[in-house]
Amino acid sequence: MHIPFLMSSSWTLTEPYTNTPIGNAVSTLDSTFFMTGAEITRDIISTMSRTEIDGKGYYLKRYTGGGKNLRRYIGRSRIRGEWESMLFFHEHGIPAAKVVAYGQEIRWGIMTRGALVTEEAPNTLDLRQMVRDSIPWLKDRAWMAKVIEQLAPAVRTMHHHSFIHTDLKWRNILVSQEDNPGICFIDCPAGQKVLPFFLERGIVKDLACLDKMGKQHLSRTQRLKFYQLYCGGKLKPADKVRIRNILGFFEGRE
């Protein structure tokens, strides 16, 4: 016997994908869990796989728990955090993975399974992979300037809306491998809006995460250019204080 308050299930197929091959394939949470694909990552509560339908690639992120430790039982599930972050980005014009479908199932108040389906951004690599593979674009100052000119205002928009990414690392930023690159944010399960009291520390953490690899692979001029674009122009005294906090954020933590 189904008792509504003991079990609930939600599933949303976004409008651009209705009556499409991928939309038909992931029309329900059940069908999404039955889909096969090439597994990319796996941990104790989730898997990520890639599948191809009608010539396009898609990523299936499937969870069998709300999170690790206490997150399994209380608070927002990680998969819900993933889709809410992606939807927030799109709402505010921030480039991010295109969301095909999302939802979760809850039993006795505990999230038991959930999924997020996104469309693959073709011809892209994340910035960390570009470093690992020594992609020459990284040494091209004009090319990197185009990346910085997109990344800085995107991060500024997040923070303007009191949204903190919490894991703003190079591995979570895709860049298209072409003369005029475009960026795309992925993987943001812990992103959220925060109260004003917590905003500045969140901003510092986000920018410190970006600069962690930035200081190894970008010049001081490039890093300063990013911050100037982020803050909207000439540095004020408060910006100089923030920069010191960014540079010192990971001291003693590594």
Image: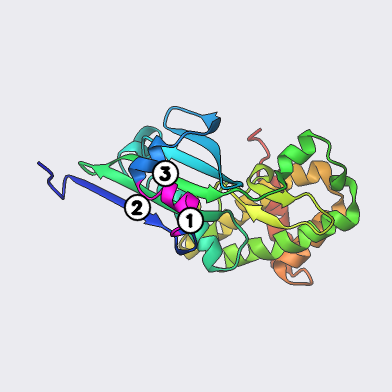
Work out which quarter of the rendered image holds the N terminus and state it: top left
Q: How many marks?
A: 3
Instruction: Please tell me whether residue 62 belongs to the stretch shown in magenta.
Output: no
Q: CA distance from mark 2 to mark 1?
A: 17 Å
Real-space Cα separation, disc 3 to disc 2, in angstroms? 9 Å
Image check: 69 left or right of 242?
Answer: left
Instruction: Kindly check if marks 1 and 3 are in contact, taking CB atoms under 8 A apart as contact.
Output: no
Location of residue 136 in the rendering, given as x and y in whole percent from the top left corner: 88, 43
Q: Nearer the viewer, residue 198 or 114?
A: 114
Disc 2, SS: strand
Local packing at callout 2 (Cα closer than 10 Å; few below 14, some 14-19, many 20+) is some
The dot on residue 20 is 1
The magenta segment? 18-28
Instruction: Name the secondary structure under disc 1.
Output: loop
Label 3: which residue?
115
Observer able to see residue 239: no
**Residue 24, position in %: x, y?**
42, 51
The x, y position of residue 63, in whole percent, is: 41, 37
Residue plotted at (78% across, 49% down): 177
> In which quarter of the view is residue 2 placed?
top left
Q: Residue 10 bears which disc, if any? A: none
Disc 3 or 2, which lies upstream in sequence? Answer: 2
Name the amino acid, label 3.
Ala
Image: 161 above or below 56: below
The quadrant of the picture occupied by the C terminus is: top right
Q: Which residue is mark 2?
A: 11
